[in-house]
Image: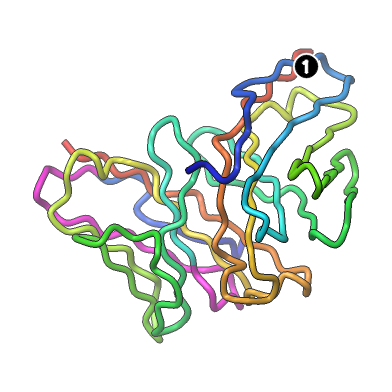
Amino acid sequence: DQQVKQNSPSLSVQEGRISILNCDYTNSMFDYFLWYKKYPAEGPTFLISISSIKDKNEDGRFTVFLNKSAKHLSLHIVPSQPGDSAVYFCAASAGAGGTSYGKLTFGQGTILTVHP
Amino acid sequence: NAGVMQNPRHLVRRRGQEARLRCSPMKGHSHVYWYRQLPEEGLKFMVYLQKENIIDESGMPKERFSAEFPKEGPSILRIQQVVRGDSAAYFCASSLHPGQNSGNTIYFGEGSWLTVV
């Protein structure tokens, strides 16, 4: 049962353009969402997060949008840079402030390639 | 750099041997999590520990796997009698405390790659 899904295995974007990575979830108990970036043979690096009480969070070139009714979130990277090329994972947790917080459910990942 | 430290980075074991993976959380963090990434899959939660306590082990296989986080020293993920299917990347993560409203973040280590031959 895949509770967090990233339906696009890969995405290719030109440098300077916008990258949009999508994520869908099925568990309505999820109330906190995170995006991680991962290079081969390295651990995931935290990028940005959003609580279910918000619908948008922005940090520099990264913006995460949350649509609770559609159970969908997206990560926008503007402008995209070649150094952004990596695997991006969407993750979700349930139980704000509780012991479930650190128990993240990850999507399968999307490989982003930004061409110069 | 006081990040999450994992060792060894790479470990090769023969079937039937034991594997021990160690994790030192980020400085000041008292909550440790272990995740496993099988080839071509996303990360899967295994266990959540605090010092001397297992809080949630719902993702741990019922047999051969155990985890601890003693009062002193690193957290240890132990796999007894390894089989080929245990070959994976094992990631440790840590956080200050579970409360997301405090702006808490879960930070991951670089991972330990286990290969069972």
Chain letter for mark 1: A
The answer to whether residue B102 is above or below residue B45 is below
Q: How is the image coloured?
A: rainbow
Would residue A23 be found to the left or right of residue B53 on screen?
right
Compared across the picture, whether A18 is left or right of A72 comes to right
For the C terminus of chain A, the quadrant is top right
Q: Within the magenta stretch, is there residue A104?
A: no
Among the 4 quarters of the image, the one containing residue A78? top right
What residue is drawn where x is 72% and y is 59%?
Answer: A32
B29 magenta-colored: yes
Q: Helix or strand or loop: what does disc 1 sit on?
A: strand
Q: How many marks?
A: 1
Tell me: residue B39, above or below residue A53: above
Task: Point out the residue furthest to the left here.
Answer: B16
Query: Which residue is identified by label 1?
Result: A13
Q: Residue at x 46, y 69 (%)?
A: B48
Q: Residues within 10 Å of mark 1 (few under 14, many from 20)?
A: some
Kindly indicate the quadrant of the structure image that contains residue A38. top right
How far from the left and from the top, in percent, is residue A103? 54, 62
Q: Amino acid at mark 1?
A: Val
**For this rendering, which residue is in front, A77 or A41?**
A77
Residue A87, image x, y percentages:
61, 32
In the displayed structure image, the side of residue B19 where residue B102 appears, left or right: right
Residue lying at 85% horizontally and 62% vertically, measured from the top left:
A53
What's the residue at 73%, 33% (across, down)?
Answer: A22
What is the magenta range? B12-32
Closer-to-camera residue (A44/A92): A92
How far across and how far down the image is residue A75, in percent?
79, 38
Is B48 situated left or right of A97 in this image?
A: left
Q: Position of residue B47 (x, y in %)?
A: 42, 65
Could you say which is closer to the camera, residue A12 or residue A15?
Answer: A12
Residue B25 vertical placement versus B81 (above, below): below
